[in-house]
């Protein structure tokens, strides 16, 4: 899974839908092999009542657009919440 996105997220209550898959926790996300090719650099999952974010950090060697993050060294500077409010 070297080339797959590293998953960092806030606590997910209940189940969320992501690419048509129902996910309950981190282990499930990693086991479903969500690949960055299917997505942009980050993805925000938003519930109607509460905002719940799932941020996929793309490994250094994979570049999408202008943003590039390393999961070990950096966290995204712009919050996912800001992009949802626009």
Image: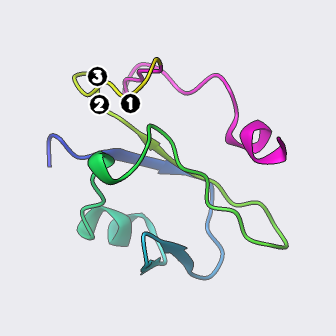
Identify residue for label 1: 71
Mark 2 vs 3: CB contact within 8 A: yes
| Front label number (1 vs 2) | 2
Find numbered disc 2 in the image and state the secondary structure of the residue it sits on: loop
Residue 17, above or below 30: below
**Residue drawn at 82 percent across, 41 percent down:** 86
| Front label number (3 vs 1) | 3
Identify residue for label 2: 59
Is tag 3's residue or tag 1's residue first in the polypeptide sequence? 3
Q: Is residue 61 left or right of residue 26?
A: left
Q: Position of residue 34 (x, y in %)?
A: 30, 60
Find numbered disc 1 in the image and state the secondary structure of the residue it sits on: loop
Identify residue for label 3: 60
Q: Relative to the observer, which residue lies in front, 62 or 72? A: 62
Q: Is residue 83 magenta?
A: yes
Residue found farthest to the left: 2
Splitting the image into 4 quarters, where does residue 71 fall?
Answer: top left
Tell me the CA gap for discs 2 and 3: 4 Å
Q: Magenta residues, as a range?
A: 67-86
């Amino acid at each position: 899974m070297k080339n797959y996105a590293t998953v960092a997220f806030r606590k997910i209550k209940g189940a969320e839908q992501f690419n048509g898959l129902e996910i309950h926790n981190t282990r499930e996300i990693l086991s479903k092999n969500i690949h960055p090719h299917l997505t942009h650099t980050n993805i925000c999952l938003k519930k109607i009542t509460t905002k719940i974010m799932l941020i996929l950090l793309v490994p250094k060697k994979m570049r999408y657009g202008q943003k590039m993050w390393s999961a070990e060294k950096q966290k995204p500077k712009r919050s996912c919440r800001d992009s949802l409010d626009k």
